[in-house]
Image (tube, rainbow, N blue to C red):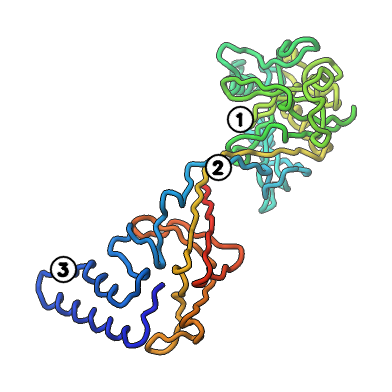
Amino acid sequence: MAVIRDNRGALLASNLSQYLAGAANTAGTPVDTNELVNIVNQFLGQGEQISADVTTVTNGIYKKFGAIDKVTNRTEVVTSGIWSSDAGSLNAFYSSSEQSSSVSGKYYLDVYNEHYTSASAEVQFSITYAHISGGGVPTLSQTDSSTLATKAIYSQMRNLLLDGGDTYFSVYNGSTEGGHDLEHFYALNINRARYKEKLDPGNIQIDLSGSAGLITLIDDSGQTETVGSSGRVFNMVSGALNIGTGNEGTINSVTASNGLGWGLFYPDAGVIILNPSAVRAGVGTTFVSASAANTYSNVTNMHNLFDAFKKGEDFQARRTENVSTSHYFVRANNREFNFSNNPTFVTGSTGQFVQSTFERDPKVYITTVGLYDDANELLAVAKVSKPIEKSFDKEVAIKVKLDF
């Protein structure tokens, strides 16, 4: 900011009034902004003068960024917890009795962080049960087997996650990777708004507990990676995040006590597939067998796994996002930004400084940086952590990070 002191302020006002009056008295004569700038610059010192073209302003209260003052088109990887309030661990699990009695309850079970009637209750993830031939659920008022909920879900998940031509989801069979075809499975679908771009491999842990004991599952992203049409695919293995990844991917961790794989993890789709046979061997959860007829409720299957989550009391997960960033280096040289627009900075009709020492040694404190476009429109505002003192004998460089 440039401050015009003494009687120059009154003289500037007089000159501007004369020019504007002359333009007003001459019909059809426009006000020339260049002429206005020239009049003002007569009363400003060197280094304080302004330009009529805002895109060429290089000092004063506005300063145009040069090529070395900005770094754009950078990408940063940001991780955070996926549950409500960005928590990384979900320890309480609730379902909705209203959903269980509705049509949607025949297909999936929503899991909440609080009782569903609470104002702060939000869906965290959903549990569903799929069977390739429709086992585990009666028809929905029809006799056509194609209307079976579990069959429809298996087909939907297959179209979403498997490559073309693949019929089954396949896990470890005791000797061969992908050697056992799953005729049925549990699917955990993380709420889309929670995982945003993708789940973070290496930061998933599920605790399931039942009559047969407790199992803790993680993914084997520390050892292997397979890429399919839906993105990356990892095995679900036994282990814990606080132990590390040294044993991930070994035969013992991939298989359950029945010799079959635990399941599959699709981080880019936000889906975890669990093998019911392996879960039953480790936890003791009852579910319909793969060859059962359509007489066993898949709602019971979903609630059995839900109960295993409630008893396990821990589901850890994080998301990861690629965030575009730009960095702007705001430089205030020693002759710049040494005055304030705050009306308390000056006093009296002639604009004298409130503090007489400011006449030769003004001091201000920078608290906010505004980023404008070429049309002088405010686009973003950055706040510094604490006020930064600025004077003629101090220069300041502030880095503004803009994420979008």
Q: State the CA–CA distance, disc 1 to disc 2.
A: 16 Å
Residue 339 is marked as none
Q: State the CA–CA distance, disc 3 to disc 1.
A: 61 Å
Q: Position of residue 51 (x, y in %)?
A: 30, 64
The answer to whether mark 1 and mark 2 are in CB contact below 8 A is no
Q: Residue at x 32, y 88 (%)?
A: 7
Q: Position of residue 341 (x, y in %)?
A: 44, 75
Residue 323 is marked as 2
Residue 152 visible in rendering: no
Q: Residue at x 32, y 67 (%)?
A: 50
- Which quadrant: the N terminus? bottom left
Q: Tell me which corner region of the image, top left, top right, bottom left or bottom right, holds residue 218.
A: top right
Q: Secondary structure at mark 2?
A: strand
Residue under circle 1? Answer: 268
- Badge 3, how many Cα within 10 Å: few under 14, some, many 20+? few
Q: Secondary structure at mark 1?
A: loop
Q: State the CA–CA distance, disc 3 to disc 2.
A: 48 Å
* Residue type, label 1: Asp
Residue 10 visible in rendering: yes
Q: Position of residue 16 (x, y in %)?
A: 24, 79
Q: Nearer the viewer, mark 1 or mark 2?
A: 2
Q: Number of numbered discs present?
A: 3
* Residue type, label 3: Pro
Residue under circle 3? Answer: 30
304 relative to 162, above or below: below
Chain-order first, disc 3 or disc 1: 3
Q: Secondary structure at mark 3?
A: loop
- Horizontal relation, residue 180 to residue 69: left or right: right
- Horizontal relation, residue 138 to residue 34: left or right: right
138 relative to 9, above or below: above
Q: Nearer the viewer, mark 3 or mark 1?
A: 3
